[in-house]
Image (tube, rainbow, N blue to C red):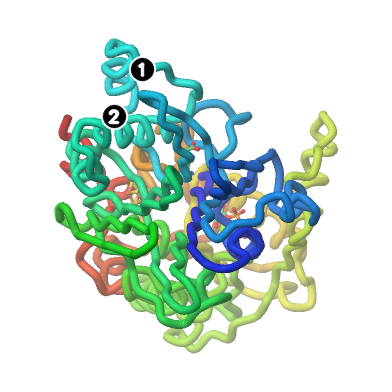
Amino acid sequence: MREKCGIFAAKTENASKKAYYALIALQHRGQESAGISVWRHKIRTLAGRGLVSEVFRGNELSRLKSNMVIAHVRYSTSGSLNETQPLETSCHGKKIAVAHNGTLTNFLPLRRKYEKKGVKFRHSVDSELLGISFLWHLRETGDEFEAMREVFNEVKGAYSVAFLFDGKILVARDPVGFRPLSYGIGDGHYFASEDSALRLFVEDIRDVAPGEVFLISDDVENKVLVKEKHHHCVFEYIYFARPDSVLDEVSVYSARVKMGRELALESPANAEVVIPVPDSGRAAALGFSQISGIPYAEGLIKNRYIGRTFIMPGQFYRELKVKLKLSPVREIVSGKRVVLIDDSIVRGTTMRRIVAMLRKAGAKEVHVRIASPPIRHPCYMGIDIPTRHELIAAFGGVDRVKKAINADSLAYLSVNGLKKAVGKGELCLACLTGNYPEWAFHF
Ligand SMILES: O=P(O)(O)OC[C@H]1O[C@H](OP(=O)(O)OP(=O)(O)O)[C@H](O)[C@@H]1O
Ligand SMILES: NC(=O)CC[C@H](N)C(=O)O
Ligand code: SF4
Ligand SMILES: [Mg+2]
């Protein structure tokens, strides 16, 4: 399962430098490319493949001096890997830069519709359509909010998006609110996918509401244009977001600890030590340990510098990569019955290898507990979940997965347990239940 993009936008002093630091705080949301666009009489964009620190090495930022910025870190879900964001496009002779997190469900038919009207698309990625639709309707209505109302009517799917055009910034969250988006105010106006990136600069922070639009020029104006039933992506809480973020007023860290607590209540295990799969399994393992009374220990160590390390061809080097990434602490594991906690299983590759690794390190029994329900359906809203046949839990029951990963026992958190842990009814759970939010597919 691949991660989501991160977006940032601000009107403030030294905007591009702040964007650089915000992108570093959002790096976990996308590692394929990074980019910054500013307004200096016209749009100027610098973007490239790689991590933020690889794309921006210092001097470039002095060429982007401005007080108006939008910025992006990308993990592609649509179009070519060579695309970067913010992307620049134009319609009716007007230019716009677009930074988008999410995936559009009616991209292809809408793109065809615009092409028939004579619009030329310059990119392969769905995000361009948001810019085109906005500029098209801006010319028709002459008003940014009315244009955005048309975008909401027309473009379906998930989008938290920032536009830069005509010396203005427009920021919007789709009417269902799949993707997170926060607004911060202090020595300027700031927006970011997660509030933890805004806390670098300001403390006065709130969520952008689903269907809400901000227009920043000389003044700041905001309106909630449409409100559908809120469907926040539950995987932000399970895995994607930083644990120190608060999304739609729910702390990601607390939600994860509660997932572990619910899991221990639903599916206890007879064991001597609770071990998390780092990094994302830690909070749930702590919750599991609190309820079960079984001590928590860091029995697996993760090398955090491995990143997109080039892997030489061949089985030997593939195995080596796994050993480089994770290794067991023998003293903790040896001779013990272990409860191993992770946030999710996607293909099952990680879990299969870890169970084998723990057995090799001397674990007597390995009981796997997963702090989310089985993923059985694809996501069309921006998470690159593999096709159904690659999802280990898509066909057959839990017992089949247990055998495949060679665990002594296996249990997943129930959908109800998950809802209790997050504490909000307004969630998208489609990849777990197969019930897709209607708005995103109504076109
Ligand atoms: O079943 P699989 O297809 O192997 O994928 C599932 C694993 O991937 C994710 O972790 P990841 O390795 O991305 O690292 P993190 O937990 O440190 O973020 C997730 O937390 C699981 O551990
Ligand atoms: N992960 C995302 O949010 C991706 C945004 C956009 N669909 C892209 O592929 O660039
Ligand atoms: S289908 Fe799953 S991953 Fe996709 S938006 Fe819904 S909860 Fe998130
Ligand atoms: Mg993990």
From the viewer's side, name the closer residue of 244 and 303.
244
User: Residue at (33%, 56%) from the top-left corner?
Assistant: 215
- 36 relative to 50 in the view: left or right: left
Q: Residue at x 54, y 41 (%)?
A: 42
Query: Looking at the rendering, in which quadrant would you find the C terminus?
Result: top left
Instruction: Please tell me in which quadrant of the rendered image residue 371 appears.
Output: bottom left
Q: Is residue 26 left or right of residue 433?
A: right
Determine which residue is flagged by label 1: 119
Q: Is residue 241 above or below residue 83?
A: below
Of residue 149 and residue 100, the one placed in the foreground of this image is: 149
Q: Please tell me how many numbered marks the rendered image carries.
A: 2
Q: Amino acid at mark 2?
A: Trp
Give how far apart the Cα atoms at labels 2 and 1 are. Answer: 9 Å
Q: Is residue 128 left or right of residue 304?
A: left
Would residue 395 be visible to someone looking at this image?
Answer: no
Residue bearing the label numbered 2: 136
The answer to whether 389 is drawn above or below residue 310 in the figure is: above
Name the residue: 49% across, 46% down: 346
Report if the CB atoms under discs 2 and 1 are less than 8 Å apart.
yes
Q: Amino acid at mark 1?
A: Val
- Give the secondary structure at mark 1: loop
